[in-house]
Amino acid sequence: MAIDISISMSAASSSAARSNGIWTALLKWSLAQNKKEDEQTTRSNASSAKPVSEEDREFLKQVFDSLVVDEVKRMKVIVGILQMPEDEVGLKRLLNESADALQKLQEVQTGRSEMEHHGGSNLSVPRSSNQRSASPTSPMKSPSPLPGDDPSMPARSLPVPTVSDYRNASLSELRAEVIRRKCGALEELDDRCLTYDNANDFMTIGGLDHLLICLLSEHPSINWRAAQALSTICQNNPKAQQRVFEHHALDYLLPLLTPPQQQQQPPPSSNSQAAAAEESQEVRDRWNVVVKALTALSALLRAEELPAIRQQFMQLNGMLPLLRLLQPPHASGSPTRVQVKVFTLVRHLIRWFPAAKNIIIQQGCLPTIIEHVGSSPDINHREACVHLLLEFAKPTGNQQDQLAAAELRKPQLGLKEKLLQRSRQLKAIKNKEDIAQAEDELNHTVALVKACKF
């Protein structure tokens, strides 16, 4: 029996050896075939290879250059656009002395929102030189003026204006084009300064001064874009915050907190309706300036490593323009996002400077703040308001705390009734989608009731 087993094992071993030999031979043959094919391909490529022509070389260089952006060079272009004048005297000097500067207008896009609204640039040029308008006073005006276009229609493809077109344009057309290009430059700057390196490089090449000057422009479309770019540069960037502080940015930002003037409504007519629509757009633009200025202020004041800027803000009475945004008639007309930003910023200021509570009391803003408790459909607005009052009622061991607590408990303010009513409303919510938010708001409301010792 043992002999049979050994014979069987010997036969199996012999069979496996033959099988391995076959696979080894097959592998060697396959490698040899691949080597022959590689040699043939190499000889074929060598015979068909040609030197790259200068035209092809230049084309490839342009392709690779288009894939790599020199960020500093690009920001220098943006700074050049921001330097351009907006006044009549400066524009005349630009036309007479600087053809290169006019050409640089084409190196940035117009503002996105402007393009979406108008469908293109007002400085539209004819399709060819022999199709110019017969009007000698306005050679750059298209047959159908773009500001009157239907915004719902698709954007029109227009030729790029040349230096000659700019020189033949009226000052009002050239001013409009400069403003649009500045808006585009500021939007591009905001995008590029999302990285710390670009933001710091922008200041190194001297761009900060020109950006701050844009905050002084009489055009709200430039103001709010400049404030937005400034907030992006400062956001969580200690080096940029220090530089902006040294350039006295607060002196530029605080005047932008001025709310738009409320105009009396004229009698209804076709002309008055058009004027009312224009005025309404102007009011929205002004509020947009306020929002972006608040955003930039928040980015500066919340710099942990720069308490000096908060001290300067208080020395400049920066609380006053903030609180005016919460006072009638501005409180009723201000957008919700303005009120949310003011509530949040004032809350931080109270935390940094408990004496700010007394400023709120003296300015008579507390009743207006309390009126907002639970009044808005916006959850962010309701939470910002309650958080502000919680910070106002929080004891820190000084005299202002005692005055603040006593002020909140005044019966004429009606805070106790508002909080209790809001608590009942929140407890009555049964919708599963709203319960989580309601629980958070209820916790804050109950905390405020306890802090006020009602």
Image: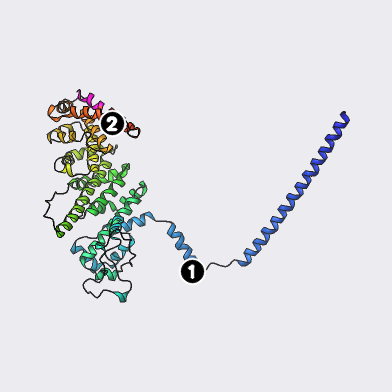
Question: Mark 1: which secondary structure?
Answer: helix
Mark number for residue 441?
A: 2
| Colour mapping used in the image | rainbow
Q: Is residue 112 visible?
A: yes
Amino acid of disc 2? Glu
- Looking at the image, the residue that sits furthest to the top is 453
Amino acid of disc 1? Glu
Q: Is residue 389 left or right of residue 119?
A: left
Q: Nearer the viewer, residue 97 or 28?
A: 28
Q: CA distance from mark 1 to mark 2?
A: 68 Å
Question: Mark 2: which secondary structure?
Answer: helix
Query: As displayed, is residue 171 above or below residue 184?
Result: below
Quarter the C terminus occupies: top left
Mark number for residue 354?
A: none
Mark 1 residue crowding within 10 angstroms, few (<14) / some (14–19) / many (20+): few
Q: Which residues are magenta?
A: 446-454
The answer to whether the residue labelled 1 contacts the one labelled 2, judged by CB atoms less than 8 Å apart, is no
Percent coordinates x, y for residue 383 in the rendering: 26, 34
Q: Quadrant of residue 11?
A: top right
Q: Residue at x 36, y 47 (%)?
A: 195
Percent coordinates x, y for residue 380 in the rendering: 28, 37
Q: Nearer the viewer, residue 333 or 172?
A: 333
Mark number for residue 55?
A: 1
Mark 2 residue crowding within 10 angstroms, few (<14) / some (14–19) / many (20+): many
Query: As displayed, is residue 146 above or below residue 218?
Result: below
Q: Quadrant of residue 427?
A: top left
Q: Tell me which numbered mark, 1 or 2, is placed earlier along the sequence.
A: 1
